[in-house]
Amino acid sequence: MPHAPLHELLWLTPTEALAVVIGTAGMYGAMVLLVRVLGPRMLSAMSSYDLAAVIAFGAILGRASLGEVPVLGGGLVALATLVVLQAATGAVRVRRAGARAVATPPVLLMADGEILPRQLRRAHLTADELRSRLRLAGVRAYGEVAVALLEPTGAISVLRSGVPIDPLLLSGVVGAHHVPERLLASISDTSGQQAS
């Protein structure tokens, strides 16, 4: 059985390189869409099932990007394509319209010590997962929590009761209307803090 020349094992033709770029861009777009649909929950601390899914996603992305027989050149082209796409996505996220299209907004999960089941479903989280994150944040009782939010990064932020919340911190948060007015700082409070 004749062996392929070394350059064929290491590099690829311009047409093959274009196919790698298109395949990588397509899979990148699919992953961005998937994260957009499933929300930041997909990026949060992973269970063993989530980890298995991420490994499978990586294998599928690699196979779709590099084709049947991956070569060094194909890997380099796919890697360069991912870096360019990541940079372009970062540039798009700087603009407000781009951020809305690419990034997922933060989601309110708790307000005034109460879990919001509808918001949990929107964020694709279970109450058990939320309780686990509250324990990690050192929360000992629901009453300690003024608000808990699922951030676009997948982290859960916990703002504790006792200090009024600047309403600007909740701008763009899905479900912020659930936060009672008494937990929010007045406009005069926030303007005074900004002046100092």
Image (cartoon, grey):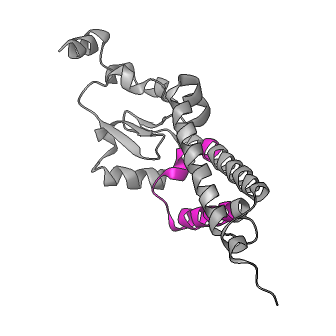
97 versus 120 height, above or below: above
Residue positioned most to the top: 188
What are the residue bounds of the magenta stretch? 35-62
Residue lying farthest to the left in this orientation: 196
Counting from the top left corner in percent of width and height, residue 2 is at 81, 87
Seen in the picture, residue 65 relative to 71 is either above or below; the reply is above
Residue 46 lies within the magenta run: yes
Along the horizontal axis of the image, is 192 left or right of 63?
left
Q: Is residue 85 above or below residue 51?
A: above
Residue found at x 28% / y 40%: 144
Residue at point 73%, 61% (across, down): 64
Left or right, 3 with respect to 180, comes to right
Q: Is residue 48 above or below residue 156?
A: below
21 or 157, nearer to the observer: 21
Q: Is residue 73 magenta?
A: no
Counting from the top left corner in percent of width and height, residue 116 is at 49, 38
The quadrant where residue 111 appears: top left
- The image position of residue 103, as x and y in percent, is 55, 36
**Hey, which quadrant is residue 53 in on the image?**
bottom right
Count of marks overlaid on the render: 0
Check the picture and name the quadrant holding the N terminus: bottom right
- On the question of residue 28 being in view, the answer is yes
Q: Main secondary structure of the magenta part?
A: helix
Q: Toward the viewer: 96 or 111?
A: 96
* Residue appearing at x 59%, y 36% in the figure: 102
Image quadrant containing the C terminus: top left
Residue positioned 24% across, 28% down in the render: 163
Kindly tell me whether residue 125 is visible in this rendering.
Answer: no
Image coords of residue 7 (percent x, y)? 69, 71
